[in-house]
Image: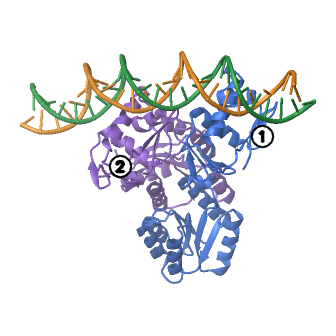
Chain colours: A blue, B purple, C green, D orange
DNA sequence: GCATTCTTGTCATCGTTCTGTCATCATGGC
DNA sequence: GCCATGATGACAGAACGATGACAAGAATGC
């Protein structure tokens, strides 16, 4: 999937810039604001995948922002990581009880914040953490057992699904019929080599989408490969 | 039933006892062991809702336990909170990357641990934290033991209720019959795989509402999933 | 304590979908 | 054009899931 969208609410300009830079380097799309009210507006405009929220900010206080984000249905499920300059344990607990998902006390290391944000996203949105394989315009979600192409949901038979998954795990590579049999059917199978042809055809038919080219390439006398289209 | 089951792996007897007491006071069903290998056995026997894991323990090391829990399909989704005596940031990051969901450095306050565990459970297993889960037009209140669809109150048998609850905690994900048996009936059960079919049918019948599509998706040769309709 | 109602696991059966194979047709290389 | 290699359509058997019925056991009410 695309970049995870992160909303950063931090009124210390130096820290904000540092974090923005580091998160962008990690592949996040970062929106940043020092102001609580503006943060709420931004969140309403485009719901982010995760919010990093300073406790002490201008405008509406951090905990109030947290509460309001939770109250609004559109943002109720968005994970929130709170930051605080104070080491007070009570704040931490109030934060977590208000609905924050994690809590860090300044000073913290950017690496720690990034690791924690990563851990939360991995759990909440597997799609954002790369559990969905994408090759060209094809997307395969193994846990949900779903395949889409250009947003359209495809329906494949079990064997075609496994075949496509194998191809998508090794995009661009050419596999002989024998290799495909071993990988998709299992080494013990005693199946005609030519049978692969048939399943390739079924796969091609299954991933057909109006106006999209065939991503399965036939390599004469060698085998088949999946191209990123 | 709706007590969250917590597995505590801590080899300092004083700390273990303290935490056990505090968590029990919070309404958790706590199983405690000082030994890593035993922890794995216990987790395999009855999958806990959350694991609190010390980094430095007897037997298998904490990080190894974490890795093995993640590798086993039955426990791969169980949230893990790691504890460490060392303050080293690298450990923290390695922990989170191995699949831990949160990380605390000793000395920590029991209140903080409890708050963090609570926050994780609220996010991962809202039903256990006494919240109402909603998937599509379905709503499930675990504490009140009530299910509604499009405002209409449904009546489900106990097994169907647990099955639906499990599905709603992992919407969209496909589970094999074996996984469903482990999750809903318990790992020790020796029940025919095909029996799951029957309960799926009963669940489907139970959540039938005029004009609403069937949210239970059959994935041939893979299992079943609950779709957000 | 007893009768009634629910719940639950299993089975046999039925319809659907999948799958491997074959025969035939199309295509590319020489 | 000829040969080798792929593509394609058809098909029958196998695999798989859906369903209705049933009996044993548990829970409930009186």
Identify the chain of the residue marked 2, using the numbered disc in the image: B
Question: At 44% from the left edge and 28% from the top edge, which residue is drawn?
Answer: B193
Q: Residues within 10 Å of mark 1 (few under 14, many from 20)?
A: some
Q: Nearer the viewer, mark 1 or mark 2?
A: 2
Horizontally, residue D18 falls left or right of residue A194, namely left
Q: Residue A150, how many percent across, how many down?
A: 62, 53
Q: Residue A66, how many percent across, how many down?
A: 47, 71
Instruction: Indicate the quadrant where residue A21 lies.
Output: bottom right
Q: Is residue A228 above or below residue B74?
A: below
**Most foreground residue, B138 or C27:** C27
Q: Is residue B203 above or below residue B124?
A: above
Identify the chain of the residue marked 1, using the numbered disc in the image: A
Quadrant showing the N terminus of chain A:
bottom right
Q: Is residue A24 above or below residue A213?
A: below
Q: Is residue B103 visible?
A: no
| Residue with the mark numbered 2 | B212
Q: Residue A200, how many percent across, how many down?
A: 68, 34
Horizontally, residue B10 falls left or right of residue B190, namely right
Instruction: Indicate the quadrant where residue D9 lies.
Output: top right
Question: At 64% from the left edge and 76% from the top edge, which residue is drawn?
Answer: A16
Q: Is residue A129 visible?
A: yes
| Residue with the mark numbered 1 | A173
Mark 2, secondary structure of its residue: loop
Question: At 44% from the left edge and 38% from the top edge, which residue is drawn?
Answer: B183
**Most foreground residue, B39 or B175:** B175
* Label disc, if present, on residue B127 of the rendered structure: none
Real-space Cα separation, disc 1 to disc 2, in angstroms: 44 Å
Q: How many marks?
A: 2
Instruction: Indicate the quadrant where residue B129 lies.
Output: bottom left
Q: Residues within 10 Å of mark 2 (few under 14, many from 20)?
A: few
Question: At 62% from the left edge and 35% from the top edge, which residue is drawn?
Answer: A160
Mark 1, secondary structure of its residue: loop
């Amino acid at each position: 999937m695309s970049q995870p969208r992160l909303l950063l609410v931090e009124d210390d300009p130096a820290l904000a810039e540092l974090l923005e830079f580091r998160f962008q380097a990690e592949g996040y799309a970062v929106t940043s604001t020092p102001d609580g009210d503006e943060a709420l507006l931004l969140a309403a405009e485009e719901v982010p995948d995760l919010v990093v929220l300073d406790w002490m900010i201008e405008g509406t206080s951090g905990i109030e922002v947290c509460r309001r984000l939770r109250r609004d249905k559109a943002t109720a499920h968005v994970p929130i990581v709170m930051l605080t300059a104070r080491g007070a344990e009570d704040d931490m607990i109030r934060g977590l009880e208000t609905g924050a998902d994690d809590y860090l006390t300044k000073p913290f290391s950017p690496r720690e914040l990034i690791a924690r944000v990563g851990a939360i996203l991995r759990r909440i949105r597997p799609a954002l953490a790369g559990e969905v394989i994408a090759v060209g315009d094809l997307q395969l979600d193994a846990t949900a057992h779903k395949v889409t192409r250009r947003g359209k949901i495809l329906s494949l038979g079990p064997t075609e699904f496994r075949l496509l998954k194998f191809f998508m795990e090794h995009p661009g590579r050419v596999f002989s019929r024998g290799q495909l049999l071993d990988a998709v059917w299992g080494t013990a199978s005693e199946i005609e080599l030519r049978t692969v042809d048939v399943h390739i055809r079924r796969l091609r038919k299954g991933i057909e989408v109006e106006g999209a080219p065939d991503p399965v390439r036939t390599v004469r006398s060698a085998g088949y490969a999946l191209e990123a289209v």
